[in-house]
Amino acid sequence: MSAGEIAVLVASVACAVAVLGVLIALRSLRREVRALGRLADQLTSQTVPLVADAHRVVDQAATEMERVGAVLDSTESVHATVDSASKLAYRAFANPVVKVLAVRAGAASGIRRLVPGSEGGEARTPRRNGSPRHGNGSR
């Protein structure tokens, strides 16, 4: 055998080993691809019901949001009505109530001055020479 034939023989053996390595790698890859396919099927079978449940929950939430929006609209309407009614009541009753309270306070003050023995009932005269003088109800 010549050197050229030996080189061809070594190259042939090297190619056969390389082909054998590629076949082994392909077999391993094929096994992994099948495992990935099974895993994808499992994930699909588990996630499809979850996604369907999520869609159902989102639809329910949208319905509830519409209801809440309607309640808020009603609440705003009631708030506006109550606000206008309270302003109207304030305008209608504020002035007369203030007048009644002023008359009551004035009357109470006058009665206290006129009735002897009531709290602060003694008529007091203004201070002269820096000392208070208490009268007996007459000036």
Image: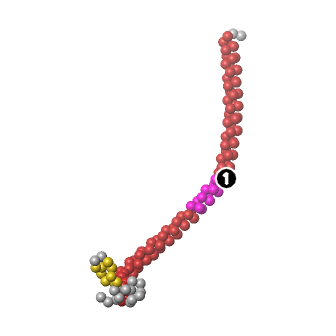
Image coordinates of residue 130 in percent, x first then y, are 30, 76
- Asked if the stretch drawn in magenta spans residue 54, the answer is yes
* Secondary structure of residue under mark 1: helix
Looking at the image, is 67 positioned above or below residue 3? below
Tell me the residue at 47%/73% (across/down). Answer: 74
What is the quadrant of the C terminus in the image? bottom left
In-front residue for pair 64/56: 64
Q: Residue 129: in sight, yes or no?
A: yes
Looking at the image, is 27 positioned above or below residue 125? above
The kind of residue tagged 1 is Ser
Q: Is residue 97 left or right of residue 41?
A: left
Highlighted range, magenta: 47-58
Tell me the residue at 57%/64% (across/down). Answer: 60
What number of labels is visible? 1
Image coordinates of residue 115 in percent, x first then y, are 38, 89
Looking at the image, is 18 positioned above or below residue 75? above
What is the quadrant of the N terminus in the image? top right
Image coordinates of residue 109 in percent, x first then y, are 36, 85
Q: Is residue 43 left or right of residue 64?
A: right
In-front residue for pair 1/112: 112
Tell me the residue at 67%/16% (across/down). Answer: 8
Residue 58 figure quarter: bottom right
Which colouring convention does the figure follow? secondary structure
Image coordinates of residue 137 in percent, x first then y, are 34, 89
Looking at the image, is 131 positioned above or below residue 25? below
Q: Which residue is mark 1?
A: 45
Residue 30 figure quarter: top right
